[in-house]
């Protein structure tokens, strides 16, 4: 499969999750708004990465940061009903973002591969005329 290698996407996802946590902390005081910012960041990373493993790993890391630092300021990870709901939301956003990235990539490839009927195809050797008609070939 072509594209970005997973070995590079996993550290990039970690850095992305840390950056989103910092931005959410600086921008908003309410925990719900912070978690929404983190979820949007996970979705955007999924669209960019287009790899399910990397998107899910980024969602899990973002859940850890959101639960440990944004929802529970004491820095503890908990597994209450709200925390598990937040984990499910991050997982769903990561999967939807990755799927949306695949759709956008397929649309772009389709658009590039579609032939433009207004342009004539270039025939090999006929772009500039015959070799004897070219100025640098004449002697």
Image (cartoon, rainbow, N blue to C red):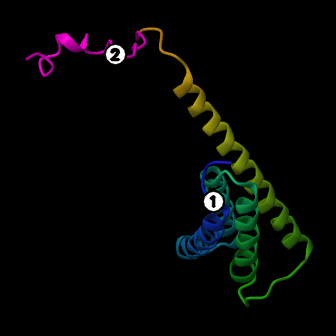
- Residue at mark 2: 125
- Residue at mark 1: 5
Horizontal and vertical percent position of residue 56: 76, 62
Q: Which residue is at the far bottom?
A: 74
Range covered by the magenta-colored residues = 119-139
Q: Is residue 79 left or right of residue 126?
A: right
Horizontal and vertical percent position of residue 110: 60, 27
Q: Nearer the viewer, residue 107 or 40?
A: 107
Q: Nearer the viewer, residue 87 or 9?
A: 9
Q: Is residue 83 left or right of residue 138?
A: right
| Residue 80 lies in quadrant | bottom right
What predominant SS class does the magenta segment belong to? loop
| Residue 59 lies in quadrant | bottom right
Horizontal and vertical percent position of residue 33: 66, 65
Q: Is residue 46 above or below residue 31?
A: above
Front position among marks 2 and 1:
2
Q: Which residue is at the far left?
A: 139
């Amino acid at each position: 499969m072509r594209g970005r290698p997973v070995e590079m996407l996993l550290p990039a996802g970690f850095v992305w999750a840390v950056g989103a946590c910092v931005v959410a902390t600086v921008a908003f005081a309410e925990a719900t708004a912070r978690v929404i910012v983190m979820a949007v960041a996970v979705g955007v990373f999924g669209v960019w990465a287009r790899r399910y493993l990397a998107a899910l790993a980024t969602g899990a890391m973002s859940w850890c940061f959101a639960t440990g630092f944004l929802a529970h300021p004491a820095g503890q990870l908990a597994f209450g009903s709200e925390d598990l709901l937040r984990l499910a939301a991050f997982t769903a956003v990561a999967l939807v973002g990755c799927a949306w990235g695949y759709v956008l990539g397929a649309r772009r490839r389709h658009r590039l591969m579609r032939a433009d009927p207004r342009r004539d195809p270039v025939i090999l050797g006929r772009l500039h005329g015959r070799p004897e008609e070219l100025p640098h070939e004449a002697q």
